[in-house]
Image (cartoon, grey):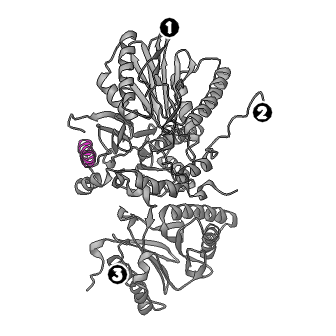
Amino acid sequence: MSSPFTLNWADDSHDLEKTNSQFDSLTPDYLKHPHKTGTTLMAASYDGGIMIAADTRTSTGTYVAGRLTDKLTKLTDKIYCCRSGSSADTQALAAIVKYHLSFYEEEIGEPASVGVAANIFRDLIYQYKYSLTAGIIVAGWDKRDGGQIYQITLGGMLKRLPVAFGGSGSVFIMGYVDSTFKPNMTRQECRDFLVKGITLAIHRDGSSGGCARLATINESGVEREDVTYDELPPLI
Amino acid sequence: MSIESYNGGAVMAMAGKECLAVVCDKRLGARLTTIGMNHSKIYEINPYLYVCLPGLATDALTVYQRLRFRVNMYELKESRKISPQVLCSMLSNLLYEHRFGNYFIGGVVAGLDPATGKTYLYAMDCLGAITIGTEGFVTGGHCEEQLYGTCEALYRPDLGPEELLEVASQAFLSACDRDAGSGWGAFVYIVTKNKVELKSLKARMD
Amino acid sequence: MSSALLPPFPEPGFSFENVERNVSLVKKGFKPPKFTSTGTTVAAAIFDGGIIIGTDKRASAGTIVANKNTNKIHKISNNIAFGGAGTAADCDQMEKMVRAHVELHRLNSGKQVPVCVALTKITQHLFRYQGHIQCALIVGGVDKFGYHLHHVYPHGSSSEVLFEAMGSGSLAAISHLELNYKQNMNLDEAKLLIRNAILAGVENDLASGNGIDLCIITPSGMEHLVDYEIPVAFV
C-alpha cells in the first residue's frame, strides 16, 4: 500500500498556503524548509590513525539555526561519524547505527570494527535512499585494520578512502585536498591540513560557517579539539 | 473558496450567571445557493451539554455520529454522565486522529453544571486545538470574525437568562447580517439549572 | 469483538481515511483549511539556577487572533517543560503524548525522569512523521545530570543549546538573546532577559502578542508564572 505521504498533499497545501495568506512572510523558515546541515566535512588518515573535522553551522533556508552544532557524532569508543544532509535524517540514522553497534559489541564481546559501522550506515542509506538525505563519513580505529575512513554517498555507495570530504562546502576544497593531501603525514601536518580545508570552505560556502571541530582517533583513543572562529588560520 | 465555507453557517456560545446560551444559524447552503433554511448545527449530548459543529455539513454529521458513539460507550463503561471537559477532550482527540486528512469542521462545546451552575465553554479548530472560553463566549463557523467583534462589544459578565438571550441574539444576528454564508434566522438554547428553552429567532431571509 | 450491534472501536493512532478525499478537493480548487497556528515568540535560556522558558500568549488563524490567552508552555512533568511553536493542535497533542509517556516511565522506574527521555520521545515521533507534524519546540528541564535545554525542529532534529528562540517572532527574540545572554546569570537577570526577548518578538511580529508567560525550572521544582506581564500597550 502506498503511503499517504506520497500523495503530495503536503506539497499542495504548502503551495496554496503561499497564495492564500497575505502574511506569507510570517510563515517561518522552519516550517517551509527542512533543517539542513549545509556542511563541510573532512577526514584524513595520518601515520598513526585518522582525523576528522567539520564546521559548526546548521541552516534552515537562509536562517542559521545552529552556530555551534557538533556534526562529529560518537558511535562507539573509537568510531565516529561526520553528518551532512538533513540533520533530522542523519541524527536518526546515527542513533540507529549507534544502537546496532552497541548491541553487536555486546554480542561479540569486543569493539566493533569500523567497516561494520560503515556497512550498517550503507545498508540503511541504500534501503531508504529515496526518503533520506544523508551523506556520511564514518571514521575510526580498530585492531585489525588500524585507522580507516569510509564515505557513504547519498545513493548508498560505500567506499574506503585515505582522505574524504563531504557536504556542500566540499566542492570548494576539492582542488586543495587533491594538491595538499599526502599519505603518512604527521599528526600536526594532518591537523593543519584539515583546519585549513575547513577554513577555506567556511569562507566560500554560505551554508558552512562558525568554528571548526576536530577529532583525532588512534590506538590510544579519541581526542577532540575545537577551533574557534578567531583561531582559524588567516587567508589571503 | 474554502471547503469549510461550502455550506456556510455559524455558531456561538455565551455564558451568563448560572446560565448558558448556545446559538446557531439556520442556513444550509451549497456555495452561494441556499438549500435549507432549518438546519441546526447544535447537537444535544444531554440537556446540560451541547456540541456545535460548524463547517462542512457532511463532516459535521459524520463527526457527530462518531462522537455520539464514543460518548455512549463512555457513559456505559463509566456509569456516569460525560462532563464538558471530557467531551471536549474526546472531540479534540477525534479531530486530531484525522490530523492528516482532516474533517472540515470547527467545534464548540458548551456545558453547564446543574449542581453548581458553573459554565464550561470550549472552541477548537479543525485539528482539535482547544481554546478555553475564558472571556465568556466562544464562536465558530463562517462569520467567526464578525462574531468575535460583536461578542467582544456586547458581552458583559454575569448576565441573567433573559438578558443573556437578548445579548447573545443581538450579537449573533448582527454578525450574521454581515455574512452571506449564514443567516435565515437562528436557534438559541437558553440553558439554566432547572430549565432548557429552545427559541427560534426570526431574521432577514436573504 | 465487533458486530453490527457493537461496531469496533477505532484503531488507535492517526486515521488516513479522508486523505484522498481532501487531496481531490484541493485539486478541484478548494482552498485547504487554515489551521490555528501558535504564531509564537518563544524564548528560553539556561541560568545559574536552572532553566527559564518564556512565551507570548497569542494564537492566530491566518490574520485572525484565534486565542488571546493561549498556553504555549507545556508541562511534561515537574522537572520538564517545553515551549511550543507551530500548529497549535500538534503542540497540544505532543504535550499529552509525552506527558503520558514520561509519567508511565516515572511510575515504572520510581525515579525522576531525565530530560532525554522526553526529548527522545519527541524527536522520534517527529521524525516518524517526516515534518508533517508541524511543531518546533524548546525542551527544557532539570535532572540528576544537570540543566538541559534543547531545540527541536519539526523534522525531528534536535540540538543542545544555552539559549534559543523559536516561532515567527524568533528573529527579533534571538537578536536580543545573542546580544545580552551571559553565562551564570541569576534568576532576576534571566527573567528580564527572557521578558525582553519575548517583548522584542511581540513588538516586531504581528502573530505574537497578548502578554507573556514564564516558566522557571530549578532543582527544587517548577514555577509557572502565567501572565507574568500584560502591558496595556501590547497589541
- Labels 3, 2: one chain: no
Q: Which residues are magenta?
A: C186-204
Q: Point out the frontmost of discs 3 and 2.
A: 2
Q: Is residue B175 above or below residue B114?
A: below
Q: Amino acid type of disc 1?
A: Lys
Image location of residue B171, percent across then percent down: 35, 23
Badge 2 element:
loop
Q: Does any portion of residue C105 appear in the rendered image?
A: no
Q: Residues within 10 Å of mark 1 (few under 14, many from 20)?
A: few
Cα–Cα span, label 3 and label 2: 67 Å
Residue A200: which disc? 3
Image location of residue B72, percent across then percent down: 65, 23
Q: Main secondary structure of the magenta part?
A: helix
Name the residue furthest left. C233
Q: Nearer the viewer, residue B71 or A169?
A: B71
Q: Residues within 10 Å of mark 3 (few under 14, many from 20)?
A: many
- Labels 1, 2: one chain: no
Q: Does any portion of residue C202 appear in the rendered image?
A: yes
* Image-based side of B156 in relation to C143, left or right: left
Q: Residue at position x 36%, y 15% from top?
A: B166
What residue is pinned by disc 2? C2
Q: Is residue B35 above or below residue A140?
A: above
Image location of residue A159, percent across then percent down: 59, 82
Q: Amino acid type of disc 2?
A: Ser
Q: Residue at position x 64%, y 65% from top?
A: A105
Cα–Cα span, label 3 and label 1: 79 Å
What residue is pinned by disc 1? B195
Q: Residue at position x 60%, y 69% from top?
A: A129
Badge 3 element:
helix
